[in-house]
Image (spheres, rainbow, N blue to C red):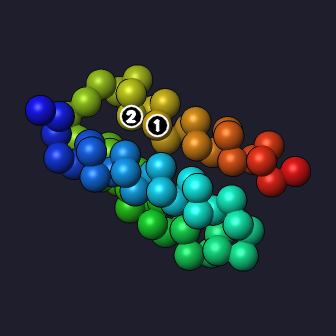
Amino acid sequence: MKDKKYIIGLTIIILTFFVSLNPYLLIFTVPVFLIGVGLLWFSKTKILTKTLWTVLPLLFWYPSMH
């Protein structure tokens, strides 16, 4: 079984990504996204996995806003 911090952090990151597609809710989703990233970085997974799950939502979010 995966680390619970990893699963919770990943779930928060995915949910905040979809909610942040509405630009009016962005101010509420950024702090929650940072909490998810913090949980993810405190989990016991590989550095590459942590980096990808931190950077990819940001890279996918930017083109979806334009």
What's the CA distance linking mark 2 and mark 1?
5 Å
Q: Nearer the viewer, residue 54 or 17?
A: 17
* Image vertical order of residue 25 relative to residue 56, above or below: below
Q: Residues within 10 Å of mark 2 (few under 14, many from 20)?
A: some
Q: Residues within 10 Å of mark 1 (few under 14, many from 20)?
A: some
- Residue at 72% x, 76% y is 24
Q: Give me the residue at 65% from left, 69% from top.
A: 26
Q: Is residue 21 above or below residue 42?
A: below
Q: Taking the image as drawn, is residue 49 in sight?
A: yes
Q: Is residue 15 above or below residue 43?
A: below
Residue at figure coordinates x 40%, y 56% from the top left: 12
Mark 1 residue type: Trp
SS type, badge 2: helix
Q: Which residue is mark 2?
A: 50
The residue positioned 38% from the left and 61% from the top of the image is 35
Q: Position of residue 20 (x, y in %)?
A: 63, 62
The N terminus - image quarter: top left
Residue 51 appears left or right of 38: right
The residue beneath circle 1 is 53
Q: Is residue 2 left or right of residue 36?
A: left
Q: Is residue 42 visible?
A: no
Compared across the picture, whether 63 is left or right of 57 comes to: right
Give amino acid for label 2.
Lys
* x and y percentages locating residue 28 in the rendered image: 56, 75
Which residue is at the front of the view, 4 or 44?
Answer: 4
> In the image, residue 63 lies at what x, y percent?
80, 43
Query: Left of 3 or right of it: where is 33?
Result: right
The residue lying toward the viewer, choosing from 28 and 47, is 28
Look at the picture and state if 24 lies above or below 13. Answer: below
Mark 1: secondary structure: helix
Q: Are marks 2 and 1 in contact (CB under 8 Å)?
A: yes
